[in-house]
């Protein structure tokens, strides 16, 4: 048997065989396999993603994301979701149909214009009332004092303009009667874009109700409060001084009480509107009643010009009775 190898290729070392490119071997066979085109399924599983450098298999676990070198900035496969329209229903909540945003300056301008309309109605009512002001002064004077028809003390005038100023003041009561429903209606127009249809219905119904309540307040003052008040004044001063009622000062008190009670009698209307619109509840008002009583007393002593304290007490009691009466009616009808 010969010592020389039968084939020169058998004598080469394994490293020389792998380094020689001209020699065919197992590596060349693997190269041919690598150069074969892959099936579509194979390509989908093995081709790396050009953006991320990872295979599609890895992309199945984590979506392809664009980065700026610091963090994810977007997902090309997920379109950006737009913000919802403010008029759309969101989470079960809806906005009023005419609700829209306005600059603060426009709101203030609109509020001033509507207040000017209310003042215009009040001035018109006062001007109409001047036609019957003298008759109204005579009628009120002879019915509020606790005397018989022939014993009522005559009014005293202490300055030249006192009679005319008193006529204007007594005419302003008619102006208040006309301005109250105008005020409620202008408030409705101002808040209308932010109101739901059922709330608009409540506000429109409140306009004639405001007129009726204002008239009841003035009548209540004329029939009950003023006679009690002047009876107290008369017997308080009787025997110690001769009573001489000044026309201007007397009607200042009369007009203040009648006008203030016309506004006070709007309390049931405001409470009903607040509860129907969901601003508050009867239960909450009942729990905070002491705070409301204190507020009513403060307003009475602030706006009722009577140093004896009798007029503010009567007005405060009236406000509290209106408040509690409204809560009682709401509880009776089952409105919590």
Image (cartoon, rainbow, N blue to C red):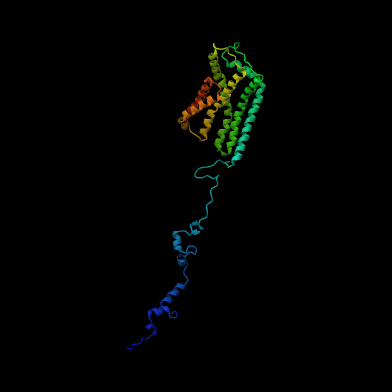
Q: Residue placed at 62% from the left, 34% from the top?
A: 114
Q: Is residue 336 visible?
A: no
Q: Can you tell which quarter of the image residue 189 is in?
A: top right
- Position of 38 with respect to 142 (left or right) is left
| Residue 285 against residue 39 in the figure, above or below | above
Which residue lies most toward the left here? 1
Q: Is residue 18 visible?
A: yes
| Total numbered circles | 0
- Position of 253 with respect to 286 (left or right) is right
Q: Can you tell which quarter of the image residue 88 is in?
A: top right
Where residue 11 appears, x then y in whole percent?
37, 83
Where residue 299 appears, x then y in whole percent?
53, 27
Where residue 37 appears, x then y in whole percent?
47, 71
| Residue 46 against residue 274 in the figure, above or below | below
Q: Residue placed at 60% from the left, 31% from the top?
A: 183
| Residue 207 against residue 149 in the figure, above or below | below
**Quadrant where the N terminus is found in the figure:** bottom left
Q: Nearer the viewer, residue 234 or 94?
A: 234
Q: Nearer the viewer, residue 87 or 114?
A: 114
């Amino acid at each position: 048997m010969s010592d020389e190898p039968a084939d020169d290729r058998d004598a080469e070392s394994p490293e020389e065989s792998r380094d020689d490119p001209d020699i065919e071997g197992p590596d060349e066979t693997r190269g041919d396999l690598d150069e074969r085109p892959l099936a579509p399924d194979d390509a989908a599983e093995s081709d790396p993603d050009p953006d991320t450098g990872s295979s599609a298999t890895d992309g199945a676990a984590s979506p392809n994301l664009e980065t700026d070198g610091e963090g994810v900035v977007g997902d090309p496969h997920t379109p950006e979701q737009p913000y919802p329209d403010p008029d759309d229903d969101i989470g079960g909540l809806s906005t009023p149909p005419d609700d829209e945003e306005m600059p603060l300056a426009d709101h203030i301008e609109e509020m001033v214009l509507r207040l000017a309309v209310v003042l215009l109605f009040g001035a018109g009512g006062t001007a109409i009332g001047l036609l019957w002001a003298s008759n109204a002064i005579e009628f009120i004077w002879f019915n509020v004092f606790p005397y018989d028809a022939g014993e009522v003390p005559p009014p005293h005038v202490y300055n030249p303009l006192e009679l005319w100023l008193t006529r204007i003041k007594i005419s302003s009561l008619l102006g208040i009667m006309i301005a109250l429903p105008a005020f409620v209606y202008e408030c409705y127009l101002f808040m209308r874009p932010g109101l739901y249809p059922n709330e608009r219905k409540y506000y429109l119904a409140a306009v004639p109700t405001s007129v009726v309540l204002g008239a009841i307040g003035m009548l209540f003052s004329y029939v009950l409060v003023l006679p009690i008040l002047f009876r107290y004044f008369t017997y308080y001063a009787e025997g110690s001084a001769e009573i001489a009622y000044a026309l201007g000062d007397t009607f200042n008190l009369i007009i203040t009480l009648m006008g203030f009670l016309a506004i006070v009698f709007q309390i049931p209307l405001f409470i009903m509107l607040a509860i129907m619109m969901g601003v508050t509840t009867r239960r909450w008002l009942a729990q905070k009643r002491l705070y409301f009583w204190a507020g009513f007393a403060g307003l009475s002593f602030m706006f009722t010009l009577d140093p004896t304290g009798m007029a503010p007490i009567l007005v405060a009691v009236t406000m509290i009775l209106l408040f509690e009466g409204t809560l009682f009616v709401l509880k009776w009808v089952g409105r919590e």
